[in-house]
């Protein structure tokens, strides 16, 4: 009966993920323009729609991948590490798919005007990436590292958390609580999350160095929008992995020790997931503000030159 219930719940989750993916594709693919921006030149509209569609496709596929991995974990051998690893690696796998789609979107931007492309100067990543979200991404990785090490030391065989021995009829019985994010699971989850953060940095580097797709001021804005999407998705994927480790670890600690410590750890896991989700949907100013940039022109009638410094934004004559 329990297996049937898990199957129904898993199938329902997968169907929900597919429905969400289809809705995103239907809403975004026909055309996407932001109400926050005034009417822009044609090239900027085309570039923004191209990036938005790549994001939508990546998000839709990522949602399906996540749902498939979570539901398929129920059908694997429950006695091995396979189901837990499949379940735990789902956020990182989905995030890598999203990052790949964002990178493809940047690589396939419509060909820029030759004069604009020729005068482009690669910008430092810090000038287009939100510093708050970038620091938060690596903070999640650091916290996950601490959790993996601590839980690994606490775990017995790397899979279960040992409980106090119980003496029954003169025999000592050793028990354990699991699955517990010890050495059998933690390093793989940490490696996947570190890979997500590294890939995010790679995509950010490409965004900062790619040829200009539109004129200078608009191109800087386009880069910052893309960089923000990369970091919002990456930090969410790592935070969800960290949240799962804390929830499983807290549950095991509470069952094994029953001291209230496990409840605190479990609560921290829930807070981590909620915080990451809120920052993804509504990033605060400290998480979304990118570094200052300056753009200049080569002359009264010359093309725009993209150069990034730490001076006040946009000066010169058109």
Image: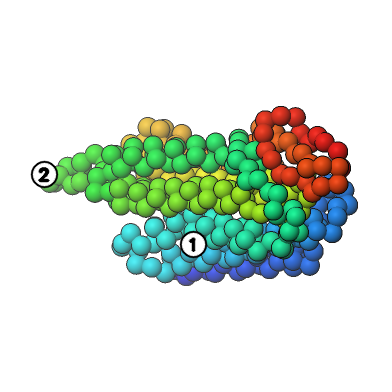
User: Which corner quadrant of the image does residue 284 belong to?
Assistant: top right
Residue linked to disc 2 = 170
Q: Residue at x 56, y 60 (%)?
A: 100
- Under circle 1, the secondary element is helix
**Viewer-nearest residue: 199 or 194:** 199
Q: Nearer the viewer, mark 1 or mark 2?
A: 1
Q: Residue at x 82, y 47 (%)?
A: 302
Rendered position, 205 above or below 5:
above
**280 horizontally vs 96: left or right:** right
Residue linked to disc 1 = 70
Q: Estimate how packed mark 2 is, as few (under 14), some (14 to 19) or many (20 or more) residues with alpha carbons within 10 Å.
A: few
**101 horizontally vs 22: left or right:** left
User: Which corner quadrant of the image does residue 259 belong to?
Assistant: top left
Where is residue 38 shown, x and y percent of the image? 87, 48
The answer to whether the residue labelled 1 contacts the one labelled 2, judged by CB atoms less than 8 Å apart, is no
Where is residue 186 shown, x and y percent of the image? 36, 48
Q: Mark 1 vs mark 2: which is more N-terminal? A: 1
Q: Residue at x 61, y 49 (%)?
A: 209
Whole-number angstrom distance, CA of label 1 to CA of label 2:
43 Å
**144 horizontally vs 314: left or right:** left
**Viewer-nearest residue: 203 or 265:** 203
User: Which corner quadrant of the image does residue 121 belong to?
Assistant: top right
**74 horizontally vs 162: left or right:** right
**Viewer-nearest residue: 81 or 200:** 200
């Amino acid at each position: 009966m329990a297996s049937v219930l898990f199957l129904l719940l898993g199938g329902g989750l997968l169907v929900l993920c597919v429905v969400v993916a289809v809705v995103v594709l239907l809403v975004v693919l026909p055309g996407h323009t932001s109400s926050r921006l005034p009417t822009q030149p044609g090239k900027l509209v085309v570039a923004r729609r191209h990036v938005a569609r790549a994001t939508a496709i990546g998000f839709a596929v990522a949602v399906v991948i996540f749902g498939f991995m979570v539901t398929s974990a129920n059908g694997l051998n429950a006695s091995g590490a396979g189901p837990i690893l499949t379940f735990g690696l789902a956020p990182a796998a989905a995030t890598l798919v999203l990052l790949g789609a964002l990178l493809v979107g940047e690589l396939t931007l419509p060909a820029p005007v030759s004069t604009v492309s020729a005068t482009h100067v690669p910008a430092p990543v810090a000038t287009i990436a939100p510093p708050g979200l970038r620091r938060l991404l690596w903070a999640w990785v650091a916290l996950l590292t601490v959790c993996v090490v601590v839980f690994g030391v606490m775990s017995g065989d790397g899979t279960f958390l040992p409980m106090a021995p119980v003496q029954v009829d003169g025999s000592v019985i050793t028990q354990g609580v699991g699955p517990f994010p010890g050495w059998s699971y933690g390093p793989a989850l940490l490696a996947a999350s570190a890979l997500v953060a590294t890939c995010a940095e790679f995509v950010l580097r490409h965004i900062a160095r790619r040829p200009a797709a539109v004129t200078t001021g608009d191109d800087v804005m386009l880069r910052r929008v893309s960089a923000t999407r990369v970091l919002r998705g990456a930090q969410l994927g790592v935070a969800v992995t960290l949240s799962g480790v804390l929830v499983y670890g807290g549950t095991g600690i509470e069952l094994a020790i029953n001291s209230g410590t496990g409840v605190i750890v479990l609560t921290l896991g829930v807070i981590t997931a909620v915080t990451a989700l809120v920052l993804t949907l509504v990033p605060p100013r400290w998480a979304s503000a990118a570094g200052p940039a300056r753009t200049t022109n080569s002359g009264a009638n010359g093309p725009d030159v993209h150069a990034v410094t730490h001076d006040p934004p946009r000066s010169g004559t058109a």
